[in-house]
Image: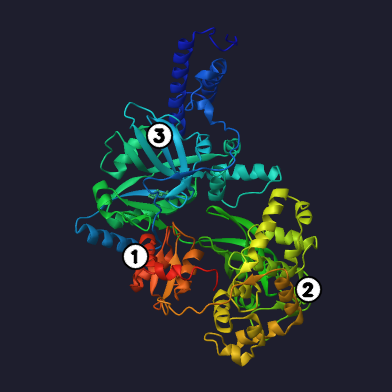
Amino acid sequence: MTKKTGLSLNPLHKNEAEIQLEKLRQQINEHNYRYYVLDDPLISDAEYDQLFQKLNVLESEFPHLVTSDSPTQRVGAAPLKEFTKVQHEIPMLSLENAFNEQEIVNFDKRIHERLKSDAVIEYCCEPKLDGLAISIRYEKGILTQAATRGDGTTGEDVTHNIKTIKTIPLHLLGNNVPQVLEVRGEVFISKTGFKKLNQAALKKGEKIFANPRNAAAGSVRQLDSRITATRPLEVFFYGVGIVEGAQLPNQHSGILKFLSALGLRISTFLEVVQGTNACLAYYHKMMQQRDILPYEIDGVVYKINNIKEQEKLGFVSRAPRWAIAHKFPAQEVLTTIEAVEFQVGRTGALTPVARLKPVYVHGVTISNATLHNMDEIKRKDIHIRDTVMVRRAGDVIPEIISVVKEHRPPNASKIVLPKYCPICHSTIEHIEGEAVARCTGGLFCPAQRKETIKHFASRRAMDIEGLGDKLVEQLVDIKLISSVADIYDLTLQQLENLERMGKKSAQNLLEQLEKSKSTTFARFLYALGIREVGEATAKLLALHFKTLPALKAATEEELQSVSEIGPIVAAHIAHFFHEQHNCDVIGKLIKSGVHWEAVKENKHQPLLGKTFVITGTLPNMTRDEAKEKLEKLGGKVAGSVSTKTSYLIIGVDPGAKFKKAKELGIPILDANEFDVFLKKFQLHLSSLTAKSP
Ligand code: 9MJ
């Protein structure tokens, strides 16, 4: 039985309804394409709404005829419990970055060398969007799966969310649809979309997004697609993955045109050019247009247009050799300093932070900038209420680069180092000649206590999963813990009564706390947070002194006999163990069950004397795991590339280190080569896998 409504022509027979539904969907798809992809609608919004309404009514009368690719299926569905993983058969590549013209010239030169050709190279130039990369699979023209890039090999299934994006067709257009087509592109949020989203969030008292990229990524990685459906997400497609049952054009620009004909939105700023000079002209043109574009771009991309040549070039460390992103320079903006606050770190060091009048800089709202220390403030002559030039480069904390002195208002005030700690009111000590000023409150200061406990629980220290920063702050604020020694006294009852903590999470945390008690001497030393004792020094100390009593008894001279430990570090270590309250904390931790295996002497260290630097994400192991493996073999892992680096290990998205290593001619191992390299020492590793430093 069918229900009669004003809009439908019912009662219809099932096959009549099927035909009508199909026609309506086709019409709506066509209009979607004209509106969202071509930006050239044929009908008014009211006419479109009428068609959509008609489809809605008909589908509600024939619910069993609703198809997964129907335009009505974009509204979002019930939340998922978790994302399922998707393997990318063809890896989703990222791009190598270039920051200046010389790097583009070098890139072009490398291409010529690899292709063994002198001919001018044809490039397809594209704007570079800074959103979230996705891969969408169409089978017989119907959207069947959408996945994030993840690490390039494994992403997350976000089909439910991607289907809510109106610029993405659920059904490809035309008669030339491949059997299987995976398309790759960038999901993003326009400048106005971002503004509206944050205005709405502010109204509702919700957290605002820092930039359109975070907003886009957060919206796509939602378990509840009904939320995603409310977000103004858009897409541009720029490539393909698996293609079956179709012969694609042999030029990149041709492939993009082919995608467009299927109803897939591509950039309207594509240009095919000859040689690097034309690429650079495109770069300057796009940089000028950047502010009037409706969406953020953070650079442009040059891709070799000839697909055969692309195939010849292949890829390295998950970035194609045939493409490069030419990034726009770091952005600088003017704003004013509204106030300066002092943050207290783990060792009591005070860091002045400028609270700025919020400014939106090409995609990011900046409201804070670090002032580093008082010397820096003096050197740059920074006052409160000054107009300042702020620079944001990549993901680093924004910095003030200069003051516009001519704009200094009469009520500008000097930044004064407080006499007392803003948190615990202990006196502030500022030793002549030292850049850093410190709160003398020590562990009496809640800020230092919180930071000490956060450090103790952190991944590279005691590795207590579930004891995150927010929880530590909460536990200290409500006085359930006041030192690291108290965390092992926490009970199930105390934990499960906390705000935002269920019984299950409380139980998990207790399990993790128990697990963390079995550690290594080096991790324990690092976790104590002794000044100047980082991970590397902690390892040296553990290896040299072997036991806690031996280390505690060491004089400053004995400490200095350890290579790489100088007088300052030695003094900090000796001072730490002279403080009775530190010894009490250690005693209590050990009484709570914290223990480690005896430190073993590693006689066979084939990588002794070799220094490694790791950059980018490794697909098969975390950086920490790689570091641990190398160190067990005697290798040292450093943070930056220099002439002393023996090998650079590159994962996905290697950064400036990759470039520097190439310039210095340092041997580079990609993830696969690194696996082979490690396997060479596997035998050795297996004899060293016990959890000891
Ligand atoms: C962006 N983000 O706009 C690529 N991209 O090509 C463009 N990203 C890309 N192309 C291969 N336009 C890997 C990534």
Is residue 192 shown above or below 76? below
Give the residue type that dot 3 points to: Tyr
The image quadrant of residue 186 is top left
On screen, residue 576 versus residue 478, left or right, reads left
- Say what secondary structure mark 3 lies in: strand
Disc 2/disc 3 C-alpha distance (Å):
61 Å
Question: In the rendered image, which residue does mark 3 sit on?
Answer: 138
Neighbours of disc 1 within 10 Å: few (<14), some (14-19), many (20+): few
Say which residue label 1 marks. 102
Categorize mark 3 by other alpha carbons within 10 Å: few (<14), some (14-19), many (20+).
many
Question: Is 261 situated left or right of 170 in this image?
Answer: left
In the picture of the structure, the residue carrying the numbered disc 2 is: 444
Residue 165's place in the image compared with 544, above or below, is above
Q: Is residue 502 visible?
A: no
Q: Judge: label 1 CB < 8 Å from ligand 1.
A: no
In this view, the mark in front (2 or 1): 2
Image quadrant where one finds the C terminus: bottom right
